[in-house]
Image (spheres, rainbow, N blue to C red):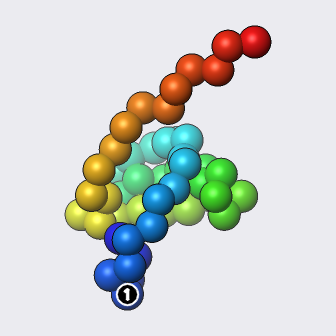
């Protein structure tokens, strides 16, 4: 959920978790982002890709 209370869905790769914040690479926005843990409503592991 963003600052305007809009729910969004992101595909991220977590880099670190510290002081109630998740630092992650966001594949949706193509860059590093910081997410407040209180605003994360649900999580799910990504499906593994088979090559």
Q: Is residue 47 visible?
A: yes
**Vertical relation: 32 (above or below) 50:** below
Q: Determine crowd level at label 1: few under 14, some 14-19, many 20+ residues with C-alpha closer than 10 A.
A: few
Residue 13 appears at what percent x and percent y?
55, 41
Q: Quadrant of residue 45?
A: top left
Residue at x 35%, y 51% (from the top left corner): 18
Q: Is residue 19 visible?
A: no
Q: Quadrant of the N terminus?
A: bottom left
Residue at x 47%, y 59% (from the top left corner): 9
Which of the two residues, 35 or 8, is positioned nearer the viewer here? 8
Q: Quadrant of the C terminus?
A: top right
Residue 23 appears at what percent x and percent y?
49, 53
Which of the two residues, 28 or 34, is positioned nearer the viewer here? 28
Residue 34 appears at what percent x and percent y?
48, 62
Residue 7 appears at what percent x and percent y?
38, 71
Residue at x 29%, y 66% (from the top left corner): 39
- The reply, left or right, for residue 7 in relation to residue 12 is left
- The reply, left or right, for residue 4 in relation to residue 48 is left
SS under mark 1: loop
Q: Quick one: which residue is furthest to the top in this view?
A: 51
Which of the two residues, 42 or 3, is positioned nearer the viewer here? 42
Q: Quick one: which residue is furthest to the right in this view?
A: 51
The residue to which callout 1 is attached is 4
Residue at x 37%, y 87% (from the top left corner): 4
- The reply, left or right, for residue 29 in relation to residue 13 is right
**Vertical relation: 24 (above or below) 40:** above
């Amino acid at each position: 959920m963003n600052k305007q209370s809009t729910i969004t869905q992101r595909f991220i790769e977590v880099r670190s978790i510290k002081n109630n914040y998740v630092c992650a690479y966001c594949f949706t926005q193509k860059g590093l982002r910081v997410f407040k843990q209180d605003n994360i409503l649900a999580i799910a592991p990504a499906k593994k890709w088979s090559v």
